[in-house]
Image (cartoon, grey):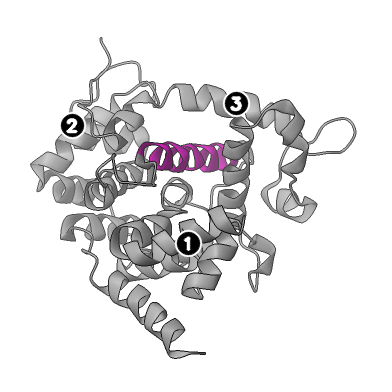
């Protein structure tokens, strides 16, 4: 490897090491939820120690996305009604958006579109998990939200390299993946995984981010990785016209890993998932407000 390539890799690693860590309270929430001995009272006490985070969690908990019929006025009730995993998802979502949001007018990067896509993958991953009847994966939403976070690391902390990646995509008609590899000798999924390890997030989540583009290349393909991969595909399908949908194919082995619904011909019924995802995404306006930096409004009683 030549010295220029080595310098680029060192630049990537330095950029990640210089990134801010997650707030102590959020890192502790992730740790507590991952511990089967944690009780609701302990988790509520920790969250309540951060008033700003408490307020944001309650606003999100009262959004149409969760659809609880009466107002959730306390963290204790939010934990009881929504569950440990959902409250963890809300805390991590709010914190990460605060730390890695950029000026929406950043040149050559559509921040609004990036978060819209990331949120869509989070929602789709949670939906596919639920429809498949899996009860063993708690990180589906967060893994979906963070699956492309490595792209933000490149944009924000390696602007020179990002400009070169864009130039390769435009001039050589390379796809993002190939351009990243040529410039950085790494791709955004690997960088995102390194960042998650820096944040001490659970290892399965870091691995899901690392392998989400190629879940079957993982040494032992995992459900969480497959969830993020399928969710990413579903969100991309939402933005395609009908003539392009056939190009977005799903491997049977990945579908079987998740117990996905099939039609009478034995094919994965992606149209069925498309319809349900559209419904889920429509209800997530409050999350989109959070991500776009807009004031979060609670539902009317």
Residue at the disc numbered 3: 276
Q: Which mark is residue 165?
A: 1
* Label 3 Cα neighbours within 10 Å, binned few <14 / some 14-19 / many ≥20: some
| Part of the protein shown in magenta | 112-130
Nearer to us of marks 3 and 1 is 1
Q: Residue at x 48, y 27 (%)?
A: 281
* Label 1 Cα neighbours within 10 Å, binned few <14 / some 14-19 / many ≥20: many
Q: Residue at x 20, y 35 (%)?
A: 56
SS at mark 1?
helix
**Magenta stretch: includes residue 126:** yes
Q: Is residue 35 visible?
A: no
Work out whether residue 293 or residue 143 is closer to the camera in this orientation and state it.
293
User: Which quadrant: the C terminus?
Assistant: top left
Residue at the disc numbered 2: 74
Nearer to us of marks 3 and 2 is 3
Judge from the rendering whether residue 198 lies leftward or rightward of residue 5; answer left or right.
left
Q: Residue at x 25, y 60 (%)?
A: 27
Judge from the rendering whether residue 44 lies leftward or rightward of residue 198; answer left or right.
left
Q: What's the CA distance linking mark 3 and mark 1?
A: 35 Å
Q: Residue at x 9, y 48 (%)?
A: 49
Please give the count of numbered marks on the rendered protein: 3
Work out whether residue 222 or residue 235 is closer to the camera in this orientation and state it.
235
- Residues at circles 3 and 2 in contact by the CB criterion of under 8 Å: no
**Magenta stretch: includes residue 263:** no
Q: What's the CA distance linking mark 3 and mark 2?
A: 30 Å
- Location of residue 179 (image quadrant): bottom right
């Amino acid at each position: 490897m030549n010295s220029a390539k080595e310098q680029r890799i060192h630049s990537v690693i330095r950029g990640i090491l210089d990134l801010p860590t997650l707030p102590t309270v959020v890192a502790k929430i992730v740790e507590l939820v991952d511990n089967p001995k944690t009780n609701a009272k302990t988790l509520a006490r920790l969250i309540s120690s951060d008033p700003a985070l408490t307020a944001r969690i309650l606003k999100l908990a009262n959004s149409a996305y969760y659809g609880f019929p009466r107002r959730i006025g306390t963290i204790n009730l939010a934990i009881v009604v929504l569950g440990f995993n959902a409250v963890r998802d809300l805390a991590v979502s709010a914190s990460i958006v605060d730390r890695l949001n950029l000026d929406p007018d950043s040149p050559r990067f559509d921040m609004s579109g990036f978060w819209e896509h990331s949120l869509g993958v989070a929602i789709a991953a949670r939906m596919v998990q639920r429809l498949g009847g899996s009860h063993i994966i708690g990180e589906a939403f967060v893994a979906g939200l963070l699956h492309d976070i490595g792209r933000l690391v490149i944009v924000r902390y390696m602007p020179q390299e990002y400009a070169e990646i864009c130039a390769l995509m435009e001039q050589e008609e390379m796809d993002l993946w190939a351009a990243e590899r040529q410039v950085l000798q790494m791709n955004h999924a690997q960088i995102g995984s390194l960042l998650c390890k820096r944040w001490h997030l659970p290892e399965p989540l870091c691995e899901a981010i690392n392998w989400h583009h190629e879940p079957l290349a993982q040494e032992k393909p995992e459900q969480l990785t497959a969830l993020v991969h399928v969710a990413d595909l579903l969100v991309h399908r939402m933005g395609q016209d009908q003539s392009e949908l056939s190009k977005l194919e799903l491997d049977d082995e990945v579908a079987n890993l998740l117990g996905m619904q099939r039609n009478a011909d034995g094919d994965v019924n992606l149209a069925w998932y498309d319809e349900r995802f559209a419904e889920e995404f429509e209800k997530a306006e409050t999350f989109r407000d959070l991500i776009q930096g807009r004031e979060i409004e609670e539902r009317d009683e």
